[in-house]
Amino acid sequence: MMAGIADDIVAVLSPVIGKGLAISAVEMQCRKLGMQPEDLSREDIEEFSTHFKKIMQIFAGEQIADEIVMKIRAIPKE
């Protein structure tokens, strides 16, 4: 399963799109970046959120996508 930053991102997304979809979205985005969710690190957040924002804009609109990206980028360093 996921760990660390990936879990934090799922926690940010779950209230907006539901936990199941949030997990799937994080897994899919990590695959597109060539990594496993458990390998996602704080250093990957910028790239992850930039790509993820494009997807969220389609499903949720630009304002919600911007809010989600800000929350993802605000995840504290471990």
Image: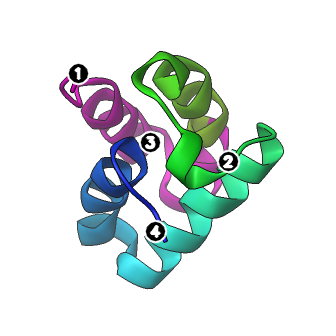
Pointer 1 or 2: first along the chain: 2
Q: Residues within 10 Å of mark 4 (few under 14, many from 20)?
A: many
Q: Which residue corresponds to mark 3?
A: 65
Identify the residue at image location x=23%, y=25%: 74
Residue at 58 percent across and 32 percent down: it is 48
Query: What mark, if any, has residue 22 been given in the picture?
Result: 4
Q: Quadrant of the C terminus?
A: top left
Q: Is residue 75 left or right of residue 2?
A: left
What amino acid is at disc 2?
Cys
Which residues fall within the magenta stretch? Answer: 54-78
Q: CA distance from mark 4 to mark 3?
A: 13 Å
Tell me, yes or no, whether the two marked residues, 4 and 3, touch with CB atoms within 8 Å: no
Q: Which residue is mark 2?
A: 30
Query: For the residue carrying disc 3, how many other residues have a C-alpha within 10 Å: few (<14), some (14-19), or many (20+)?
Result: many
Q: Amino acid at mark 3?
A: Ala
Q: Which residue is mark 1?
A: 77
Q: CA distance from mark 3 to mark 2?
A: 18 Å
Image height of 37 relative to 70, above or below: below
Q: Is residue 35 left or right of residue 34?
A: left
Residue 63 in the image, given as x and y percentages of width and height: 38, 39
Asked if the residue at tag 1 contacts the one at tag 3, i.e. Cβ–Cβ closer than 8 Å, the answer is no
